[in-house]
Amino acid sequence: MASSSFYDDRKYCLECDQYVPYLMSAEHSYCSNCGSRVQLFSKEDWSQFSENLKPRRIKGDSPDKKRDSA
Ligand SMILES: [Zn+2]
């Protein structure tokens, strides 16, 4: 059986530019490689994550397109 997912015990370190094992303190987590603060997601993953939180636009309700002046 596969155990926990890869991301469960790793966070993203900007310094190392990768997901790393981390040390937890009261408020923040720190990279076990370089000691920098780590975050839950990389920038790219975060933007994807927040993208998923946005309400989806309803298709068919497109705004008026700018028309080229004739
Ligand atoms: Zn690091």
Image: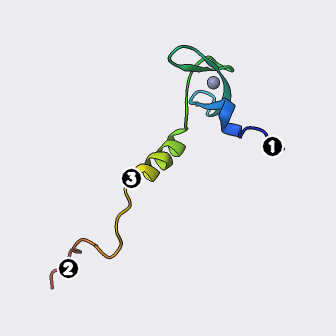
Relative vertical location of residue 9 with respect to residue 1 in this rendering, above or below: above
Residue lying furthest bottom in this view?
70
Which amino acid is tagged 1? Ala
Cβ–Cβ under 8 Å for marks 1 and 2: no
For the view shown, which residue lies furthest in the top direction?
Answer: 26
Q: Position of residue 12 (x, y in %)?
A: 59, 32
SS category of the residue bearing label 1:
loop
Residue name at image x 35 percent, y 64 percent: 57
Q: Secondary structure at mark 2?
A: loop
Residue 17 horizontal side relative to residue 1, left or right: left
Q: Mark 3 or mark 1: name the one nearer the start of the chain.
A: 1
- Which quarter of the figure has residue 32? top right
Q: Which residue is mark 3?
A: 54
Residue drawn at x 56%, y 30% as measured from the top left: 14
Q: Earlier in the sequence, mark 1 or mark 2?
A: 1
Where residue 21 sits, quadrant-wise, is top right
Picture layout, residue 70 above or below residue 3:
below
Q: Which kind of residue does numbered mark 2 sit on?
A: Asp
Q: CA distance from mark 3 to mark 1?
A: 32 Å
Question: Is there CB contact under 8 Å for labels 3 and 2?
Answer: no
Distance Cα–Cα, label 1 vs label 2: 58 Å
Q: Mark 1 sits on what residue?
A: 2
Residue at label 2? Answer: 68
